[in-house]
Image (cartoon, rainbow, N blue to C red):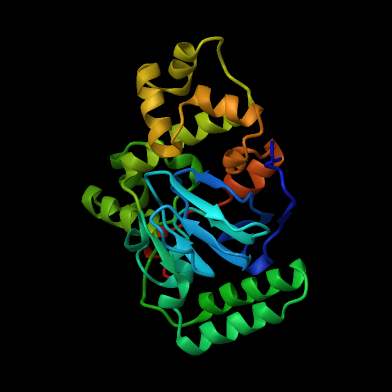
Amino acid sequence: MQDPSLPHASLAPHPLLADICMHFLVKEVPSCWYTVPASPLPMLIVVLNGAMEMEDGQTLSRFAIIGPNRHRSRGKAQPGSRFMSTTFRPGKLSNILGYPVDEFSDAVINLADVLPLSHNTEVNEKLDAANGTAAQLDVVQSMLLRLRLLEKPRIAPLVIPYHWINKPAQELADSLGLGTRQFERRFLASFGLSLRSYKQHLRYGTSLMQVMLGRLPAKTWAECAMNFGYADQAHMNHDFVRFTGHTPAQLMRGIAGQDPALWAFSFNEAELGELFIPSDEIDVVSVQDRIIT
């Protein structure tokens, strides 16, 4: 069986992007149909070489933004294809693009569609000329830094400490000095999902990490479901199939068998922390008035 752990590297972001982007992943992708799990966090994917076909028949653009999504997706790479990606921290995509994040929910957007033509041409030429991973990373990060500095609509993203998310909407609204409906609108615009949907993702994401690492909290799946916060095993299986295309048991068997179609679920604990789990170092002061300029 093809080893899903093809060469990859995790690279730290530029200090001026560390509050927006998590670690960059550079990876050669197995040449088979693979599953990309649903995620509440948007991602930037840059195809460094080769090509990736999506299940709808479209080819992934060279620079693509994958918005917060509520369903798993599938793709297939040409042999030897290699990509770079980064996950945006919660509520931070609008800092780069200047648009409400819910405009990108459940969508794959060609970044060229939101970039000035001259900027897009320049970035592509620089990426073509880049020699090696470090130089390619520099091109991508320079692009993101430039986007961050470009003049944008005055959007005030909702900044919320990660450990606050499980609080009730009313409590969050009160803490931020907002009315409940205003909070819900601002949350959707900043995070791309409703608070309820975002919490569903967090429950599934926490459960998924334990399944990926093989650290189950109980001996039976029914007991695991209760520990994960689900009403029962059927409820848990429903969420997992919706978000990953597999039940937890199927995922564990596939990961253990090194199924190349599950490479996106085959990371160790340190890599998971760097790539997909936001740190929580936010100082919340008058967050409702913060405007990115």
Q: Horizontally, is 189 left or right of 35 in the view? A: left
Q: Residue at x 47, y 12 (%)?
A: 223
Furthest-left residue in view? 181
Q: Horizontally, is 182 left or right of 95 in the view? A: left
Q: Residue at x 32, y 39 (%)?
A: 196
Furthest-top residue in view? 219
Q: Horizontally, is 252 left or right of 96 in the view? A: right
Residue 39, position as x, y percentages in the image = 46, 46
Is any atom of residue 43 visible in this view?
no
Q: Residue at x 34, y 41 (%)?
A: 197
Q: Which quarter of the image is occupied by the N terminus?
A: top right
Q: In the image shown, does 48 or 1 lie closer to the viewer? A: 1
Q: Horizontally, is 13 left or right of 291 in the view? A: right
Q: In the image shown, does 283 or 79 lie closer to the viewer? A: 79
Up the image or down, 135 lies above or below 227; here it is: below
Residue 188, position as x, y percentages in the image = 32, 54
Q: Residue at x 42, y 62 (%)?
A: 58
Is any atom of residue 205 visible in this view?
yes
Residue 37, position as x, y percentages in the image = 48, 43
Residue 87, position as x, y percentages in the image = 55, 55
Which of the 4 image quadrants contains residue 97?
Answer: bottom left
Up the image or down, 136 lies above or below 91; here it is: below
Up the image or down, 156 lies above or below 74; here it is: below
Which of the 4 image quadrants contains residue 257?
Answer: top right
Q: In the image shown, does 35 or 64 lie closer to the viewer? A: 35
The mark total stands at 0
Up the image or down, 168 lies above or below 77; here it is: above
